[in-house]
Image (tube, helix red, strand yellow):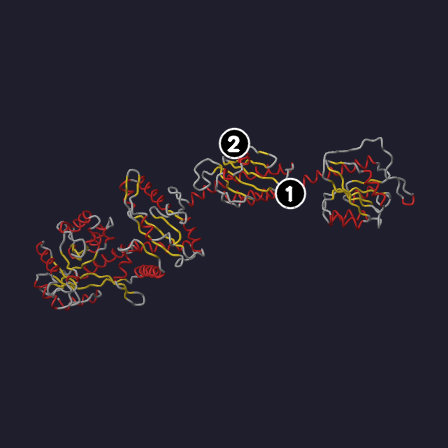
Amino acid sequence: MQVSEDTNDDFLFIDDSDEDEILDESGADTWKVLIVDDDPEIHSVTQLALSDLVVLGKRLEYIHAYSGRDACQLIEQHNDIVLVLLDVVMETDDAGLNVVKHIRETLLRQDIRIVLRTGQPGYAPEESVIKDYDINDYKTKTELTRRKLVTTVYAAIRSYQQIDTVTQNRTGLEKIIASSADLLELHSVREFAEGVLTQINKLVTANTSVFCARGQGIVEGADDLSLYILGQQGLSSILVSQKLDTLKNLSVQNQISTCFQHKQHQYESGGVALYLSSGGFRAVVYLELVGTLTDIERQLLEVFMTNIAVGYENVHLFQKLRNAAYKDWLTDLPNRLEFVNLLDEFGQSQDNNLVAGLIDINHFSDINDGLGQDVGNQLLMAVTSRMKAMGERCQFARVGADVFGIIGPNDCVTPEKLVDIFTEPFSAGEQFLPINATIGLCTKEDAATRGVKILNQINIALNLAKKSHQDHFVYYKTEMEEKTLWRLDMIRQLRTDFAEGRLELWYQPQLSLESGKVIGAEALLRWRTAEGKFISPAVFIPLAEYSGLIIDIGDWVIHQACKQIKDLEQQNYHHVGISVNVSIPQFKRDNFVDNIIGAIREHQIQPSKLELEITENILMDEPQVVIDALVRLKHEGISIALDDFGTGYSSLSYLQKLPLDRLKVDRSFVTDIAQPGESLIADTIINLGKQMNLKVIAEGIENEQQQAHLKAQGCHEVQGFFYAKPMPSDEFLAFLQENN
């Protein structure tokens, strides 16, 4: 084609029919080429010259622009343009150069290949253009033969394809890195499996996908080596935690199994099975593909599977750690920590028909001690199995050595159904063990919102149930906690006041019925608060025993009594002794006897003037140990009295063995002693004491009739309000001066 000299455009193509064409006949898709020139004939000639060209399997598709402005608009509309054949001089002398700047700087398209074609090189010198503008080639129209044009286009498109491949790889790798980071945040195997499928679908498009692995140690209840579905996408039914054969697709099952057995990826026309392995943990991801995988997609998938393999191992290790932290090693039930988490869900649930509880096996330690821990463990497994038989509606946990937790609907978690668990003996090895349990319950209505708080509420109910002699269960109520808080406040106050010296020892005189003289006094503990208010011993003594403070208080009482005896001796009241009550926790201490002897020697008093009052309940646990301790005390000259005789254990066989000096008749036998037929027990105790050569003292004397009856029966000594109320030390000394 000849162009007029007025246009300064020379021949675009010269005859080059003797040159070979660069053709590739193997493709169906197209490459979009934008021809930008203000001369329509240039468009026609260019399209004609390239009409049969096939580049990398694709033919060319042409888009035409006749100005720089039109070119910019078309590039914005078509994001798949790969090549621009661009004239320089059009509506302006630099219109083409402005198009280059728009592509690179405004649209930020670095992938589009740009070839400048000009018939007026003077307006755009080659050296200056190549230096200042991001173009890929520069040609004058006079030098472009058909052969050179084909070569230029082919090279430009190949360059685009290489850049596009790199871009896809980079984008894919960025997705892999981002996906891996997301997957690292997932800690359960199921979450990880679902996450992997989600991330894979960002790399390639799949109709359906499944994540499969052996279920042992992953799927609850799975103890075989079969393949299980751990995650799924695109399936019509939920198959998670089910065996692979539930997929009901034999070809897919075979492809997954083959992949798992051969430990390598399996690519087929309809789908791909990808193998995943790290640290001995293996899995297979199956994808039903929408189209055919490109080489890049295939490479990315393989890189992705390699990258997440370590993550898969970590998830397994994390699950093992979590099981160690939140599961009971013996029963495989949730442990205490996990039960608290379950109680969190319970407290925040909108279902008001739920109940949570604790089941405490009674006397379990006796089974461990008597039959061994192996039998004890077998018993716990048997209990676990029987509880699970209640159904899947209930959640169970082992929260202590012999304590189980339960959460479930109120029609399932009932005292009757829980008690029924223990109606039949349990098989543990060769043993058939009948056991029972104590139960604490809390309804959703009465429960707090936090798990730790709810557990505390159930514990309160359980402890009350243990103290109950009628029912084996108790439901938590708000007032229970209020009482508990009151008790804790009282214990804290008692500790504080004891440390600050607000506890006092008062003395109730004991008199001889024969002479009417004071022969001693019972030391009685009194608590005066900082506000001057007295707290009843019936209130604070049990609190002191419950908190263990009674040990320190008891030691203090012994020393105060010894000081009082010393004061009495210094004032010539050598015949007056002091009786001190001894609690069970005090007596159970190994150093109890040594402490008593040490106090006597420290204060340098006559041992016989200190009398220890013990109750029958002390004898119940280990009678012989008690007897041996009392014999030691008696050997040191310390007096021993049996308090509240007849109200408790009352074993005459042990009574004969005790090194006693005195029997004490309880006030409950004295109250109605003057009434006909009401004095039998008191009279019997008095006669028994006389026959055993023991002094007998009666407490709770409030009137003259009681005194007369006791005197007639030969009772030796008395104490009560009829004679004097308990009084502080200084008042007791004044009382002695007036009555002796």
Callout 1: helix, strand or loop? Answer: helix
> Is 583 displayed left or right of 139 in the figure?
left
Q: Is residue 183 or residue 592 the one in the foreground? A: 183
- Tell me which amino acid carries mark 1: Thr
Horizontal and vertical percent position of residue 75: 75, 47
Q: What residue does disc 1 label?
A: 171
> Is 369 displayed left or right of 508 in the figure?
right
Q: Is residue 715 above or below residue 41?
A: below
Of marks 1 and 2, the one in the foreground: 2
Callout 2: helix, strand or loop? Answer: helix
Q: Which quadrant holds residue 63?
A: top right
Q: Which quadrant, please, contains the C terminus?
A: bottom left
- Tell me which amino acid carries mark 2: Gln
Q: Which quadrant holds residue 721?
A: bottom left
Horizontal and vertical percent position of residue 225: 46, 35
Q: What residue does disc 2 label?
A: 261
Q: Residue at x 65, y 40 (%)?
A: 169
> Is 452 displayed left or right of 257 in the figure?
left
Q: Which quadrant, please, contains the N terminus?
A: top right
Horizontal and vertical percent position of residue 639: 15, 55
Query: What number of labels is visible?
Result: 2
10 Å crowding of disc 2: few (<14), some (14-19), many (20+): few
> Is 717 displayed left or right of 484 in the figure?
left
Of label 1 and label 2, which has the lower sequence position?
1
